Image (spheres, rainbow, N blue to C red):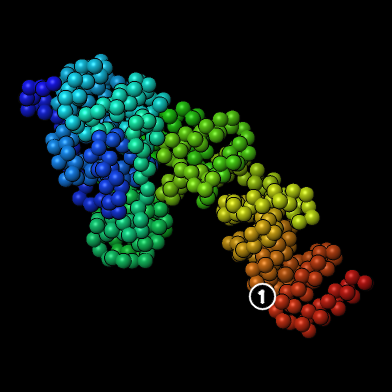
């Protein structure tokens, strides 16, 4: 069916210009272009600021897409009009040049959309595809029909993964180190190849928006690399805000104001904070165990993944480093879900552990969650330094490590710095000595055992004095100090026999 030529006012709207630089996306762009050439609908899914729009615009200005679709390339920014069916239909009619005013459904637009081959982008489509939004079911049906039109190639960018099944879904990853550096220095235009910059980019998980904001702030303020490092260490992600009020915070808060997120209830943000707090994220198998008071916790965490606020990796629900930095609770003690999770971990570690103890195999869980527990203890031994249960859990943690994953721990200096009159210090020192011994550091092992021996003698704990002396004998033996080891064994024998 042929349509008469449209007047200039009805010729539709061309897409915005392509970004001047889109580093590290060549493979993904080629994949989208190839799909579009065969009119296969495609959806680019990922967290806010991951670069979905930049990729889509680069595709729309690709020479092969221009050859394939000519001027029939239309770009609809879905976050710039109310998320109702009527507004979407009006925008579709306007942008494509169909010229139908106030269509109530797709029927009057269908002949026009079927008359020519066209590629249409629905950018930031999460604002209209949110399943808890206004007219959600009707809008989804409309987008699904658009994806099925044989003359139309639909390209969706969205934070939400609730996409019509006809669409080929592509997850947009973070940048490579090389692409992250090229992105940063394309904007910064100063020193190149700095290890300090590389380290900061790594701490940002190579997240494109964060890198662009960091480079823009540094460029606008004319910071050198050393000043940039100081500002980052002092302000972390709060530094990611330009003079024109573009910020990482705004991008994150946009996701948190979505109807779907609001539907999760008042605990949702605090639960996100728990994911952000733990460097490994949250073990999927632990959700009900960690949050016993939240009846729909598994559904909420699934929803976080749908919204691209979190992702799944090796059985853990985790999030990008910039999001972790922004969403992690400033005062961990004020987060009720985090405090509940802390107590659950502390109880779990309180079992008497050893190969001859019941449930020894079950305590191997520490192998996969040791960094989470270590961070938990590192934080709470700082803010609850005089609390007994924190230090008891610290000793229990090291016992778990000794049996299942011997390694050094960053808690060592804190244990050494703990007040000598704290009731938990001797045991913490003894458990720390076992870790030193298991990793071959017998000098440190002997040092902390000597400190523990002094404390146990001062407290008159004869049984513990004997045990520490025995461990000191072993430490001396490993160090080749046979005479000292022999003499200590003699003193131990005398001590044991009165």
Q: Nearer the viewer, residue 153 or 73?
A: 153
Q: Nearer the viewer, residue 311 or 426?
A: 311
Which residue is painted at 85% across and 74% down in the image? 492
- Image check: 360 left or right of 164? right
- Image check: 9 left or right of 299? left
Q: Nearer the viewer, residue 129 or 292?
A: 129
Which residue is painted at 63% across and 35% down in the image? 292
Task: Farthest residue to the bottom: give it.
Answer: 483
Q: Would residue 414 be visible to someone looking at this image?
A: no
Which residue is painted at 73% across and 72% down in the image? 450
Q: Quadrant of the C terminus?
A: bottom right
Q: Secondary structure at mark 1?
A: helix
Query: Residue tagged by mark 1?
Result: 443
Residue 114, image x, y percentages: 20, 24
User: Relative to 277, does residue 399 appear above or below in the rendering?
Assistant: below
Residue 159, image x, y percentages: 37, 37
Q: Would residue 21 be visible to someone looking at this image?
A: yes
* Corner quadrant of residue 157: top left
Q: Quadrant of the N terminus?
A: top left
* Corner quadrant of residue 194: bottom left
* Corner quadrant of residue 133: top left
Pointer 1 local density, CA inside 10 Å: few below 14, some 14–19, many at least 20 = some
User: Relative to 433, does residue 118 appear above or below in the rendering?
Assistant: above
Q: Nearer the viewer, residue 107 or 400?
A: 107
Residue 281, image x, y percentages: 52, 47
- Image check: 268 left or right of 22? right
Which residue is painted at 76% across and 56% down in the image? 355
């Amino acid at each position: 069916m042929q349509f008469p030529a449209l007047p200039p006012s009805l010729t539709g709207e061309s897409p915005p210009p392509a970004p001047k630089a889109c580093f590290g996306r060549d493979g993904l762009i080629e994949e989208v272009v190839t799909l579009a050439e065969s009119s296969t609908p495609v959806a680019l899914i990922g967290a806010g600021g991951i670069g979905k729009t930049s990729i889509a615009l680069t595709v729309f200005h690709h020479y092969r897409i221009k050859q394939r679709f000519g001027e029939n390339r239309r770009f609809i920014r879905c976050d710039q009009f109310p998320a109702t069916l009527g507004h979407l239909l009006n925008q579709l009619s306007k942008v494509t040049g169909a010229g139908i005013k106030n269509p109530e459904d797709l029927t009057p637009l269908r002949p026009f959309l079927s008359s020519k081959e066209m590629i249409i982008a629905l950018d930031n489509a999460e604002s209209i595809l949110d399943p808890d939004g206004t007219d959600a079911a009707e809008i989804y049906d409309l987008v699904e029909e658009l994806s099925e039109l044989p003359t139309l190639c639909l390209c969706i960018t969205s934070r939400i993964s609730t996409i019509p099944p006809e669409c080929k879904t592509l997850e947009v990853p973070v940048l490579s180190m090389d692409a992250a550096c090229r992105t940063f220095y394309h904007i910064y235009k100063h020193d190149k190849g700095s290890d300090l910059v590389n380290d900061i980019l790594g701490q940002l998980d190579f997240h494109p928006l964060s890198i662009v904001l960091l480079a823009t702030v540094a460029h606008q303020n004319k910071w050198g690399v050393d000043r940039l490092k100081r500002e980052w260490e002092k302000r972390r992600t709060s530094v990611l805000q330009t003079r024109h009020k573009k910020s990482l915070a705004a991008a994150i808060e946009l996701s948190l104001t979505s109807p779907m997120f609001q539907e999760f209830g008042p605990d949702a943000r605090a639960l996100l904070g728990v994911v952000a707090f733990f460097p490994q994220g949250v073990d999927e198998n632990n959700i009900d165990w960690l949050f016993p008071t939240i009846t729909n916790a598994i559904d909420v965490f699934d929803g976080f993944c749908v919204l691209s606020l979190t992702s799944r990796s090796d059985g853990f629900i985790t999030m990008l480093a910039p999001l972790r930095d922004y969403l992690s609770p400033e005062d961990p003690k004020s987060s009720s879900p985090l405090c509940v999770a802390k107590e659950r971990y502390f109880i779990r570690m309180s079992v008497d552990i050893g190969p001859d103890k019941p449930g020894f195999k079950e305590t191997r869980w520490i192998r996969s969650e040791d960094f989470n527990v270590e961070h938990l203890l590192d934080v709470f031994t700082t803010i609850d330094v005089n609390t007994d249960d924190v230090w008891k859990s610290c000793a229990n943690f090291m016992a778990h490590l000794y049996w299942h994953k011997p390694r050094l721990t960053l808690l060592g200096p804190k244990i050494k710095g703990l007040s000598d009159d704290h009731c938990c210090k001797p045991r913490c020192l003894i458990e720390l000595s076992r870790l030193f011994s298991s990793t071959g550091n017998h000098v440190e092992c002997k040092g902390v055992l000597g400190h523990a021996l002094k404390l146990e003698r001062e407290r008159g704990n004869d049984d513990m004095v004997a045990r520490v002396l025995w461990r000191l004998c072993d430490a001396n033996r490993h160090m080749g100090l046979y005479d000292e080891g022999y003499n200590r064994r003699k003193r131990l024998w005398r001590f044991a026999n009165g």
